[in-house]
Amino acid sequence: MWSFIRATVLTFSLASTCIASHSDSHKRDINSLRARNIISDGSDLQSSYDFIIVGGGLAGLVLASRLSEDTNHTVLVLEAGESGDANITQINTPADTYYSSLVGSEYDYAYQTAAQTGCSNRNVPWPRGKVLGGSSAINGMYLVVPNEQEVNALHAIMNDTDEFWTWDSYYAAMKKSETFGAPSAAVAAEAGIQFNAASYGSSGPIHYSYPGETFGLVGNWTPSLLTLGVPTNADSGSGDNTGAYITTSAINPSNWTRSYSRSGYIDPLPPRSNLDILTSATVTNIVWKSGTSGNLTATGVQWASSSTAAPQTVNANKEVILAAGAIGSAQVLQLSGVGPSKYLQAAGVDVQLNLPGVGQRLQDHLSASLIYNTNAETAGAEENTGDTSAKFLSFINSATAYVNLTTLLGSADATALISSAQAAVSSSASTLLPLGDPTVAAGYEAISNTITNQFYSANVGQIELLLSITSTVVVLQAAIQHPLSVGELYITSNSVFNYPFLNPNYLVHSADLTILREGLKMARSVSQASPISSFLTGETVPGSSVSTDAQWNTWLEGAVGTEFHPTGTCAMLPLELGGVVSPSMLVYGTSNVRVADASVYPFEFSSHLGAPTYGLAEQAATIIRDFWNGVSVNPNSTSTSAAPATTSPSSVKSSSNGALHSIVSVGGFICAAIACLAGSILL
Ligand SMILES: Cc1cc2nc3c(=O)[nH]c(=O)nc-3n(C[C@H](O)[C@H](O)[C@H](O)COP(=O)(O)OP(=O)(O)OC[C@H]3O[C@@H](n4cnc5c(N)ncnc54)[C@H](O)[C@@H]3O)c2cc1C
Ligand SMILES: *[C@@H]1O[C@H](CO)[C@@H](O)[C@H](O)[C@H]1NC(C)=O
Ligand SMILES: *[C@@H]1O[C@H](CO)[C@@H](O)[C@H](O)[C@H]1NC(C)=O
Ligand SMILES: *[C@@H]1O[C@H](CO)[C@@H](O)[C@H](O)[C@H]1NC(C)=O
Ligand SMILES: *[C@@H]1O[C@H](CO)[C@@H](O)[C@H](O)[C@H]1NC(C)=O
Ligand SMILES: *[C@@H]1O[C@H](CO)[C@@H](O)[C@H](O)[C@H]1NC(C)=O
Ligand SMILES: *[C@@H]1O[C@H](CO)[C@@H](O)[C@H](O)[C@H]1NC(C)=O
Ligand SMILES: *[C@@H]1O[C@H](CO)[C@@H](O)[C@H](O)[C@H]1NC(C)=O
């Protein structure tokens, strides 16, 4: 979650900061541009690789790093965006995510949803990273471990006999990605940070840490929530992520830089002759073996450096792995003829396989913000003084609270909401899903039952509350965690360069509206709770004219925006529930195409999606390596994965080309104040 402000004053301050930038204090070091295995010239590619990874984002670079650790395999990553080196300071500096954001820049797809009937018919902006590291290079760096009950529900709904996705094995995979770093004693005391280091990993590539500087307002967070019945969670990374706490952030405490998939998983690698990463390479489609019956087999992919460049082909000896994100992976599958045939035909794509679930179940966390004037020190005010110290610029928002339904509504209203939502499950399945596919409807029912029968009545967060002080005002946000509204994504042309139609159907289910409204009321209650109340000097948004339910509804429909967590478009679910991938992430009906990124969650977790997606990609890499090496992944599992005997340990192609380590040169582009502005006025 990244915070933004719509206030005019702040918009101007963001724009001017953008132009000035912090480059003086973070001089670009040409040596840091040394880009391991990153190539910019497609003519340096081999003609084939064992694994082709589509998308070098958060998950894609985890896969690239782990799969190429195994010298039995050669690996290629094709990433649509640039390396990021031209703007590496903005990527590396945590607080630049607010003061000099890359949202709205060339590194952002800047998608927009279709007009949302539940949100005053607005087209809601949907930023997504288009750069090496993907959205992990431009995101808000919150790291929240999901709830154990949600993960076990995923395991249960999938008939996951290999136990890849039980809490125990998924939690172990998440820990593989983590190195925990404790806050300084002074920061911990001022911000009220409590933690249990043992709940995190200690030798993984991504730093789970805290800013080097903080503010007294942050220390008011957990005591204020406590007065509202939300307990302080001193161990939020252990499977119970409910309650109020200061969560970990993706910050490397050794130099206060952003820790993201490129800096964690790729930059520290020694040279690897079995790994190539090509930037500015957009995959247009998967190439299928022709003339075979049964499962589709990918022989490779086509990619292009721009919409006008001729597509080129590169072959996959073993697998194509889609890691193009919640929008890109479903888009590429559909462009390759795999998806709902109705939509593919309308877009002029030959249907290879009618797989209705591709692009269905599109959903998101959505949030709105209350704004308060303050007499306390904020990070935004300090930024205006021109503080460019690395410690100050490591301060990012991380105070959060996950509130369950009974605390949010009180038990009588919670019970009433649960029964009305349960009663509406099958009628919602028939009204909310325009595709009209019975498997997708069955999946909708199964997951709605999981949410309404389990999550609503358990100690699982339904609302996330957040505190933002990175402007000169205080922002309190509320975000719904398990929407019953779902929508769809589909291509409207046969070109990857045309954005797909994106409709998350925000707030079309009345339970979502109720939960979000009550969450916003609770955010207002936080503003009135001691001790934070004594530092807030008036609510400017929405203000006192909004107090009845009807007024809240009207206001929030005009004010909500994305919490940046779209998912569901390549759902990991049984085929008969409209699923797209199996527990081993293989696309149904294909023999060698997997999806391993944030598109596979069939329902949202009560967490930001970065932390679980590092674990998901770690687990996927283990599954894939063990499959091809012919070993059983989970010693507890009864089934073993029999690897096709096509692997030759000597299949590593040594690159004769020294240019594999060449530095990417990226043409200068202009951080127009307009681009920064665009970034600052989202939501
Ligand atoms: C502004 C913003 C703020 C966020 N804040 C947070 C936060 O604070 N905490 C958190 O946990 N999560 C946050 N998120 C969400 C989190 O970053 C994403 O959920 C996560 O990065 C998803 O990982 P991914 O690998 O699925 O996709 P991505 O990281 O988005 O990577 C997908 C990659 O695939 C590439 N690609 C797409 N199509 C193609 C193609 N056809 N050919 C080649 N390459 C392609 C893209 O360019 C991109 O690099 C935020 C996201 C955004 C956008
Ligand atoms: C390569 O594969 C063999 C089995 O085919 C396996 O034993 C070995 O561990 C693999 N190598 C690596 C580095 O994983
Ligand atoms: C899950 O497995 C059980 C037992 O094998 C089976 O009865 C059930 O139909 C499966 N469910 C789904 C959704 O595939
Ligand atoms: C295997 O089972 C044991 C005992 O139930 C459990 O502690 C362990 O976490 C399991 N291992 C995996 C990888 O799931
Ligand atoms: C930050 O420190 C890490 C070592 O922990 C180093 O690898 C990385 O290059 C540094 N980043 C910058 C931008 O200096
Ligand atoms: C298709 O692939 C799946 C998964 O590997 C496999 O179980 C199934 O038997 C295959 N079907 C055919 C017809 O080859
Ligand atoms: C919700 O949270 C409160 C506070 O921790 C707790 O007392 C209550 O039991 C929780 N509700 C459920 C259903 O677990
Ligand atoms: C990216 O870097 C270029 C070259 O240094 C610079 O001109 C531009 O302003 C930067 N872009 C953004 C969005 O800041």
Image (spheres, rainbow, N blue to C red):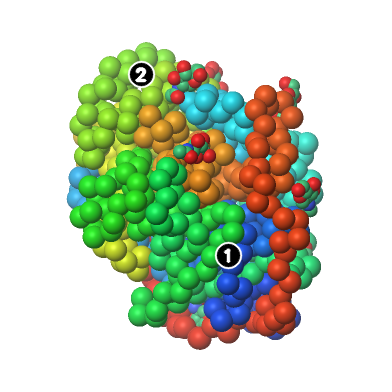
Left or right, residue 94 beside residue 501: right
Vertical order, 108 against 145 (above or below): below
Front residue of this view, candidates 78 and 392: 78
Q: Earlier in the sequence, mark 2 or mark 1?
A: 1
Bin the neighbour count of mark 1 within 10 Å (Cα to Cα): few under 14, some 14-19, many 20 and up.
Answer: many
Is the C terminus in the top left, top right, bottom left or bottom right quadrant?
Answer: bottom left
Vertical order, 488 against 485 (above or below): below
Q: Which residue in the protein does label 2 denote?
A: 418
Percent position of residue 422, x then y: 32, 18
Give the mark count.
Answer: 2
Bin the neighbour count of mark 2 within 10 Å (Cα to Cα): few under 14, some 14-19, many 20 and up.
Answer: many
In the image, what residue type sits under mark 1? Val
Left or right, residue 606 beside residue 93: left
Percent position of residue 150, x then y: 53, 29
- State whether residue 22 appears in this view: no
Q: Which residue in the protein does label 1 denote?
A: 77
Q: Determine the residue positioned at 72% across, 46% down.
A: 629
Foreground mark, 2 or 1? 1
Percent position of residue 557, x then y: 26, 44
Compute the Cα span from label 2 to label 1: 45 Å
In the image, what residue type sits under mark 2? Ile
Front residue of this view, candidates 255 and 78: 78
Percent position of residue 349, x then y: 28, 58
Q: Secondary structure at mark 1?
A: strand
Q: Determine the residue positioned at 44% across, 54% down.
A: 329
Front residue of this view, candidates 475 and 503: 503
Q: Secondary structure at mark 2?
A: helix
- Figure quadrant of residue 588: top left
